[in-house]
Amino acid sequence: MRPAAALRTRIAPRLGGSPTTTTERGLAVGVLVLAALGPFVFSDYWVSFVLTQTFLIGIAAASMIFLSAYGGMISLAQVALYGIAGFALGNMITQAEAKGLNLGWNPWLSIVLAILITTAIGLVFGGVASRSFGIYFLMITLTYAVIVNYFFGQVTALSGFSGISGIARYAPDLVGGGTDRTRLYYTALIVAVLVYVLIRFLLRTPFGVALQGIRDDPVRMASLGYNVALHRTLAFAFGAFVASLAGILYVFWNGQIDPATVGLAGTIDLLIVAVIGGLARVEGAWLGAFAFIVINNYVRDVTVPLVGGSFKTIIGLVFLVIVLVSPQGLMGAWDRLMRFPGFRRRADAATETAPGPTAGP
Amino acid sequence: MRHTIRGSKLAIAVALLAAMLIMLAAACGGDDDDEAAPTAPAETDAEPGEEPSETGPIKVAIMTDCEGAFAFGYELDIGGAQAAFYEYAGAEPVDPATPSAGMNGGTVAGRDIEIVGYGCGDDTAATAVRETRRLMEQLDADIMLGPLSGDEAVAVAEYARDNPDKTFIIGTAGSQDPTLQIAPENVFRYHGDGAQWNAGLGEIVYKRLGWRRAAIIMDDYSFGWTSAAGIIADFCAIGGDITHRVFPPLNTTDYATYVQQLPSPDQVDGYFWVVGGTGTGSALQAFEQTHGPLDPTQHAGNLFFAFLGNFEAVAPRLVGSYVGGFGTAPGLQTEQAQAYEEIMGRWHPDLPAADGFVYNYYNAAWALIQGLEAAGGDLSRLEESLPTELRSGYQVSNGGNVTLDENRQAIQDQYPLQIVEGDDGNPTVEVIGMVPGVDQAFGGLFTSDSPPPGRDQPPCEQRELPWQGQIQLVEDGQVTEEVLE
């Protein structure tokens, strides 16, 4: 049996954490139908603020979860990468605004270039970090986040600490943004679905399978002849590509971007989103984003008794509870529920003899 | 097989339960108007997205900061704004010691005033946009009073441009862009911008202290740049030269590396400080550690030098330093000023009436009330009804009225200050001059086509300013006819 095929057999039960039960499939369909009907069911505010933001933040979180769950790489650079896309797009697409280069280029060209620039930078970042593992990899990506934050803060020709504004009005009509929030909602929804499908597809390709093997045992994979550093670099570049889509949607949704968006606070927020949703399954990205945004939005006027503070205290408590009770996040809790009799996955049968894969470094 | 059948039924039940919960969430998502409001909520008969009723409450949001460098402004801003509603709209505070506890009642032109929420910004544009959308879309406010900070106002002005059906009256934000480079028709500002506030400061240090060459250190964001622009324009116009410009980011905590970039005291005549919020004290202490004890004749600051409590360890060594204004005049002995201070003392005696955060939000709310009355409570006519002249507590020229220019930006008297030793031996500030009728254009230097203030804008150029040579001296709170020579 060829190495890749053997590998696929060993780790097949963990592939993609795919929804294999009737319940999960039914729920997925239900959620998609509800999302498709969103503007007809929910208020304008929920459509334009809560749900659209859920989709785009979820895309960014999906890039983080893809790297962590299937590549064994916890990256704190995803917000920085989506910021690069946002800043690049803002500088290229605007004209005669107060800040930025105001190049006034064609919106579609600008979008493509922003994606390419971000992916290329992701390739470079990934290349530098690919030979590091664990905490060292995490610290390198944190360095990227700080560099990007200060770069856009200090280079006033591109942004400055006040950022670039007025971007949404240059969005292509097909994409929406500015005053056409319903169209942007559907754009974000479609992109989120496509990202999810793309990640699931990628994980089943030889590249994806190898990546998961590298996650579990890079030494063994190297001894089998796989170029571990190259795989990790390419995975990081893919994560950058996904993050760039989130960044583009973000600036069309928010209309502006500034270095504070991609600062340490934003980086930690995305990590919180991913942890709440569940770092082990890509579906957790959108679940975590939804939970985070709803809490952020609806507890801003609440003061926590005795402790004081509001949103940040509450989200911190939620984060703590999840880490202690369900380290795999909300999706982990769901997976445990699904293991109850009657919900057991069909694929679970294959795991009864094959050893479970170990967590990556 | 039995397990599979039971499992399927259970699966279907769970799926149905999940669907019900989702529908319930959807129903809750459509009821954002039920969000708890700081005022006792009046009956609302307008759903989000519908045209506002002419008889329902007028929904007002107050946008301020509760985090970041200007978190101290939270209660000041809210108290200032609500004091106008107490005085002129019949509202009452829930807790006079805590303005954010809300207010009860309030009626203008026969319509109830409802404060739907307080925005919790952190002086960043991203949070400001998020809070603005929460206030204006989720809570469906008709009017916003705010925001507080420069970058926030730029973002809010952009939002306002895309949402022309809402009205925005800026609270205390001093960035230039919102009413010059952006200037949407639904954004109003009844106070000067950061540059206007510093009118006269450059001329004072040039004439009284003999400064010819100075360095400037400014917070690296829109208000810092605007505030510095006023100092630079004023100082250079009369013949001064700015030799160094240094830009620490806002919220910097360690200013050592930035102070190192400043020239030594023997290389320049003085330093202008445009470092604010919680950074003033840290920056000044870093300077002392690098260049030795502060010489008050070598240091002048923007409005943040008047917030002596933020740097009380250093303040005694700055007695004698000159300070840029905030549109306010603490201690001004005019009937109008005293009437304003009596109003604030009546409703919020714990708030400093002469504080710019209080005063500017008060004026914003006072203008709104007048506009609503003139419009008969008809929000569709509010913007055309907002006053173009506002009788403001600390305004002396133009009959005591602040005037709005064609961009809905205030033309306002400005009051340079000086740190002096108070009767109790502690440093305090007093007004030493009055610069009449300062406009945003600075005599043509700033236009809608000119680049907004930035690190290198404006350049240091000699020119004539409308108020050059016309700064009236103020002594013991009285504006004299004597002009600064």
Image: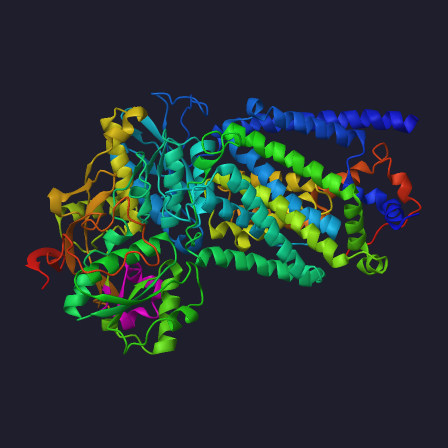
Q: What stretch is highlighted in magenta?
A: B299-322
- Give the residue at x 22% y 72%: B297
- Give the residue at x 71% y 60%: A134
In the image, residue A208 above or below residue A344: below
* Residue A141 visible within the image: yes
Q: Position of residue B284 (x, y in %)?
A: 35, 69
Q: Does the magenta stretch include residue B319?
A: yes
Q: Position of residue B328 (x, y in %)?
A: 22, 52
In the image, residue B67 above or below residue B115: below
* Residue A327 visible within the image: no
Q: In which quarter of the image is residue B220?
A: bottom left
- Give the residue at x 77% y 41%: A17
Residue B467 as seen in the image, left or right of residue B146: left
Q: Does the magenta stretch include residue B63?
A: no
Which of A173/B363 is in front? A173
Q: Position of residue B335 (x, y in %)?
A: 13, 47
Q: In which quarter of the image is residue B270?
A: bottom left
